[in-house]
Image (cartoon, rainbow, N blue to C red):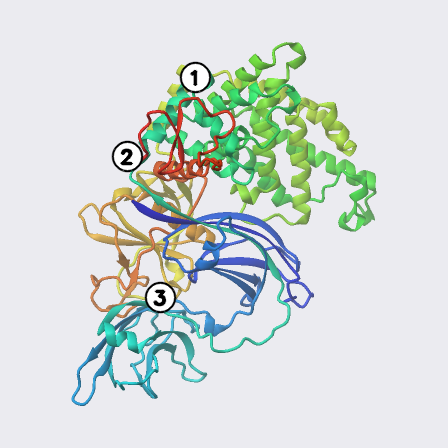
C-alpha cells in the first residue's frame, strides 16, 4: 500500500498587474514552487498587464508537502527579473476544496522574512541540574537553507533564545547545508511559560543579517516528553504586519489536490479482469460496467476518467478493443451522421487521450516543421478584410505602403504554402503512423461505414477519422503548440493569428470542405483551391492509413517492440568532475542525449551513432545541483555505479527550469524500481578536498540532503502505472452510489436493477453478482 499525492495545476491568466518597465507595461511569467522548490516556469507574455497563459501541469509529489506558491515575475533582459507578487496555497487549503480551488486570488507582497525554506536537526533534553532542571538544546545541522548571498549560498548561524537569555552557534561560511554539533543549556524555571525559540540567520558583514527561519517549542510539553530529536521545518516570521503596497493585481488559478492510497496489484485484479472481459466480449456481450461508467461520468471529470481507462487498457494491450467498444456504443445512439462524435462523450475524450499518448511523436514529425517555420518567418498574415491593419503591414518597393488587396493576396499565398506543406507531409506519413493508431482508425472507419452505408454517406467514415485526427489533434496543436510540447514559448499576437488561420484551414479540410464550413467565414475563400485539393489528398491518405491487416499490424508492433523508444531526448551540456581545479560552466560540452527504458546514451548529433553512457539499472539518484557549484541553477546530477560497482556522478546542464525538471522527472520515473536507490545525496560538488555544500572532507560521507525521487511532472510519454489507473477507476465507481430510499435500500442507477448486479454495502461499489470484494 502506498500513499500518493498529485496536483493538477492550471495557470489561467492575470489581470491588473503593476507596470514594471519604463514603457508602462510588464513582461510577466509565473514560477511555481512546491515547498520553495521551483518546478514550473510558464512562458513569458510580452508587454501586457493582463497576461493569458492557459497552461496546465500535473505534478506528482510526496503526501508530506506543505504548500504550493505561484510567483508572478517580470522578465528583464539586462537586469535581474522583478518580483511582482505571489499567491500561496497551503496543503490544508487545497484539502478543504475536494473539487479543487478555482478562481481569482489577489497577489501579495513577497516579504523576505516569509521566504524561508529548509529544515534544522535538533536534539532537546530536560536534564537534572544541581539546583533545578536544565534545558539542553543541541544544534546539530541544517539542510536546504535559503541562499541569501550573491554567491548562491548563505553564512548561517543559529540563535537560541529562552527566558531572556540568548546563545549563538558559530558561523558556517558559504553553505546552505551547515553542520554545527553545538550544545547550549538553560536553567528551567518551574513556572516559566516562555517558549524555546531556535532561529536561523544568515550573517552579513556590512548589512543586517538575513532571517532564515525559526522553530518554536512548548517547554511544558518538553518537560513531559523529557527528550525530543528530529528534523524540524523552519517557519517564517509572521509577527510583522506587511506594508500596504497597493494593488498588485490578481491571478486566476485552478488547482486540485488528489490523494490516493494505491493498494497492491492483487487487490485490483477482480476489477481489471471484469473490465478486460467486458471489452473482449465487445458490444454484443452482456457487459454493463463500461456503459455504467459512461452514464455516470459528469462533464467535469469525463476527461480524467477517459484518460485513466485508456491508460489501463493500454497496459493490458486492449486499447484498440476498448475504443472499438466505445465507438459501437456511440454509433448505436446516433441517428444523424452529421452529429457523430461531435459531443464531448466518453468515446471522444478517450480517443483524444489515446492520440496524445500513442500519437504525440507522430504529431511532432508532421506538424513540428510547419510550426517552426511559422515562428521563424513572423509574417503578418490576415484574410479577414475587417481586421487588416495598415500600420502592421510595413512597406514594399520604394517605401510604398501596401494596399489591402496586396496584404490579403500575400497572406493567402503564405497560408496556402503552409497548408500545402502540411498536407504533403501528412500524405507521405502512412508508414510513420504508429500501428496501434492505424488499427484503431481502421476499426472506426469500418464501424461507421457499417452504421451509415450508401452513397449519400460516402464521406461519413472519412469525416469520422478526420474529426479526431484533424479537429481534435492537429488543429488544437497548431493553435496552441506549447500545450502539445511543440514550442517552449507562447506565440506573439502576429504568430498566433497565423496559426489560428492555418488551424481553421485544416479544420475545413477535415470537414471535407462542406458548404456549412464554407459559409461560416466567407473571407477564407482564397484558400478554397488548396482546401479542395487537400480534401482529395486527405481521403487518399485515410484510405491507405486504414488499409492495414492484422498481420501487418502485429509485424509493425513487433518491430517497434524490439526498438527501445526514447523516453526523452535532446541536447544537454555534460561535465564530469576530475582533479582539484575550479569547475566553471565553460567546462561543459554540448551533446545530444537520449533516455530509453534501457540506458541513458549520448551522441555528438541526433543522427550520430549513440554511445551507451549509463545503464538504467545502475542509476541511484537524479537530483538538482545547488546554484553556487557551477554558477547555474539548471544543473542536475545523475548518481550511478559503473560496471565495476564504483559510485560515479555525471553533471548535466539544462537551459531552463522546465527542461531541468522534465529530465529529472523522466530519469526518476524510469529508475523508480531500481534497487539501491539513495535516500540522501550531496547537492554540491566535491571540489578540492571537501564537499562544497556541507564542507565535509570525506568524499564518501553520507549525503547532507534528502533525495526527491517522488517529485515528478506528468508527461504524455510517462511509463504506465497500472495500479494507479485502476485505483482512479475504482474511486470513480465508489462514487456511483445510489441515494437511499425511505426503506434504507439503495436506489439503482437507471437501467441496472435486476440484471444480476449487487451493491457491496461495505465499499458502496456496484459489482456483478457473485464477484468477490476488491480487496
Percent across and percent down for residue 528 are: 73, 27
Q: Say what secondary structure mark 2 lies in.
A: helix
- The answer to whether residue 213 is visible is yes
Specify whether 232 is left or right of 541.
Answer: left
Residue where numbered disc 1 is placed: 285
- Pointer 3 or 1: first along the chain: 3
Percent across and percent down for residue 162 are: 32, 84
Callout 2 touching callout 1 (CB < 8 Å): no
The CA distance from mark 3 to mark 2 is: 39 Å
Q: Residue 113 has which mark?
A: none
Location of the N terminus by quadrant is top left
Specify whether 15 is left or right of 266.
Answer: right
Specify whether 229 is left or right of 313.
Answer: left
Q: Say what secondary structure mark 3 lies in.
A: loop
Single out the residue that lies furthest toward the front.
743
Q: Residue 144 has which mark?
A: 3
Residue where numbered disc 2 is placed: 266
Q: Say what secondary structure mark 1 lies in.
A: loop
**703 or 596, nearer to the observer:** 703
Q: Residue at x 69, y 35 (%)?
A: 415
The CA distance from mark 2 to mark 1 is: 26 Å
Percent across and percent down for residue 505 are: 68, 32
Depth check, mark 3 against mark 1: the one in front is: 1
Amino acid at each position: 500500500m502506498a500513499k500518493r499525492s498529485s496536483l493538477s495545476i492550471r495557470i489561467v491568466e492575470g489581470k491588473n498587474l503593476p507596470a514594471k518597465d519604463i514603457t508602462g507595461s510588464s513582461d510577466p511569467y509565473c514560477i511555481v514552487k512546491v515547498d520553495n522548490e521551483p518546478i514550473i516556469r510558464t512562458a513569458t507574455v510580452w508587454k501586457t498587464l493582463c497576461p493569458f497563459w492557459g497552461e496546465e501541469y500535473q505534478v506528482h509529489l510526496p503526501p508530506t508537502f506543505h504548500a504550493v506558491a505561484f510567483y508572478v515575475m517580470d522578465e528583464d533582459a539586462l537586469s535581474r527579473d522583478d518580483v511582482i507578487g505571489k499567491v500561496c496555497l497551503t496543503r490544508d487549503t487545497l484539502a478543504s476544496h475536494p473539487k479543487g480551488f478555482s478562481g481569482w486570488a489577489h497577489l501579495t507582497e513577497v516579504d523576505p522574512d516569509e521566504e524561508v525554506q529548509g529544515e534544522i536537526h535538533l536534539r532537546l533534553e530536560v536534564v537534572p541540574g544541581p539546583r533545578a532542571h536544565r534545558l539542553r538544546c543541541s544544534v546539530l545541522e541544517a539542510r536546504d537553507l535559503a541562499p541569501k548571498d550573491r554567491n548562491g549560498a548563505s553564512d548561517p548561524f543559529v540563535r537560541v533564545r529562552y527566558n531572556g537569555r540568548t546563545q549563538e552557534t558559530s558561523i558556517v561560511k558559504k553553505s546552505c547545508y551547515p553542520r554545527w554539533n553545538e550544545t547550549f543549556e538553560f536553567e528551567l524555571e518551574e513556572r516559566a511559560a516562555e517558549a524555546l525559540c531556535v532561529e536561523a540567520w544568515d550573517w552579513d558583514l556590512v548589512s543586517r543579517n538575513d532571517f532564515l527561519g525559526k522553530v518554536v517549542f512548548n517547554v511544558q510539553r518538553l518537560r513531559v516528553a523529557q527528550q525530543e530529536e528530529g528534523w524540524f521545518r523552519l517557519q517564517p516570521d509572521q509577527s510583522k504586519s506587511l506594508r500596504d503596497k497597493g494593488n498588485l493585481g490578481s491571478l486566476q488559478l485552478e488547482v486540485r489536490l488528489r490523494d490516493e492510497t494505491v493498494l497492491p496489484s492483487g487487490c485490483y485484479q477482480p476489477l481489471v479482469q471484469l473490465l478486460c472481459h467486458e471489452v473482449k466480449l465487445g458490444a454484443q456481450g452482456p457487459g454493463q460496467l463500461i456503459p455504467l461508467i459512461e452514464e455516470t461520468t459528469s462533464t467535469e471529470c469525463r476527461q480524467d476518467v477517459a484518460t485513466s481507462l485508456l491508460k489501463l487498457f493500454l497496459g493490458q494491450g486492449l486499447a484498440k478493443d476498448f475504443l472499438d467498444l466505445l465507438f459501437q456504443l456511440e454509433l448505436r445512439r446516433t441517428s444523424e451522421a452529421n452529429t457523430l462524435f461531435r459531443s464531448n462523450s466518453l468515446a471522444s475524450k478517450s480517443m483524444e487521450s489515446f492520440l496524445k499518448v500513442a500519437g504525440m511523436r507522430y504529431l511532432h514529425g508532421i506538424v513540428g516543421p510547419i510550426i517552426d517555420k511559422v515562428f521563424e518567418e513572423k509574417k503578418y498574415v490576415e484574410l479577414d478584410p475587417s481586421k487588416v491593419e495598415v500600420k502592421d503591414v510595413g512597406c514594399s518597393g520604394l517605401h510604398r505602403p501596401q494596399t489591402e488587396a496586396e496584404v490579403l493576396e500575400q497572406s493567402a499565398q503564405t497560408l496556402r504554402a503552409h497548408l500545402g506543406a502540411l498536407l504533403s507531409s501528412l500524405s507521405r506519413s502512412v508508414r510513420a503512423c504508429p500501428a496501434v493508431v492505424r488499427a484503431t482508425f481502421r476499426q472506426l472507419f469500418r464501424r461507421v461505414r457499417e452504421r451509415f452505408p450508401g452513397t449519400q454517406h460516402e464521406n461519413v467514415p472519412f469525416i469520422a477519422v478526420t474529426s479526431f485526427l484533424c479537429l481534435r489533434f492537429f488543429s488544437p496543436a497548431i493553435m496552441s503548440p506549447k500545450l502539445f510540447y511543440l514550442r517552449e514559448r507562447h506565440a506573439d499576437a502576429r504568430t498566433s493569428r497565423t496559426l489560428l488561420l492555418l488551424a481553421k484551414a485544416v479544420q475545413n479540410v477535415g470537414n471535407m470542405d462542406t458548404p456549412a464550413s464554407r459559409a461560416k467565414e466567407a473571407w477564407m475563400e482564397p484558400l478554397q483551391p488548396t482546401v479542395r485539393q487537400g480534401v482529395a489528398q486527405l481521403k487518399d491518405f485515410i484510405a491507405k492509413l486504414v488499409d492495414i491487416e492484422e498481420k501487418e499490424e502485429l509485424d509493425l508492433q513487433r518491430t517497434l517492440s524490439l526498438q527501445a523508444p526514447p523516453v526523452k531526448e535532446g541536447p544537454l551540456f555534460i561535465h564530469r568532475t576530475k582533479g582539484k581545479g575550479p569547475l566553471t560552466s565553460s567546462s561543459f560540452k554540448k551533446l545530444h542525449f537520449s533516455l530509453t527504458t534501457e540506458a541513458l546514451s549520448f551522441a555528438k548529433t541526433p543522427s550520430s551513432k549513440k554511445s551507451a553512457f549509463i545503464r538504467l539499472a545502475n542509476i541511484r539518484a537524479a537530483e538538482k545541483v545547488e546554484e553556487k557549484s557551477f554558477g547555474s541553477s539548471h544543473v542536475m546530477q545523475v548518481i550511478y555505479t559503473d560496471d565495476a560497482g564504483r559510485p560515479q556522478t555525471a553533471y548535466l546542464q539544462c537551459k531552463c527550469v522546465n527542461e531541468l525538471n522534465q529530465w529529472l522527472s523522466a530519469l526518476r520515473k524510469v529508475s523508480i524500481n531500481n534497487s539501491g536507490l539513495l535516500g540522501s545525496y550531496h547537492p554540491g560538488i566535491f571540489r578540492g578536498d571537501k564537499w562544497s555544500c556541507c564542507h565535509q572532507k570525506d568524499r564518501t560521507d553520507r549525503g547532507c540532503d534528502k533525495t526527491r525521487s517522488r517529485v515528478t511532472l506528468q508527461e504524455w510519454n510517462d511509463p504506465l502505472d497500472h495500479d494507479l489507473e485502476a485505483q482512479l477507476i475504482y474511486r470513480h465507481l465508489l462514487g456511483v452510489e445510489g441515494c437511499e430510499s425511505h426503506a434504507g435500500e439503495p436506489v439503482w442507477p437507471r437501467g441496472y436493477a435486476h440484471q444480476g448486479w449487487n451493491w457491496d454495502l461495505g465499499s458502496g461499489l456496484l459489482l456483478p453478482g457473485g464477484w468477490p470484494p476488491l480487496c
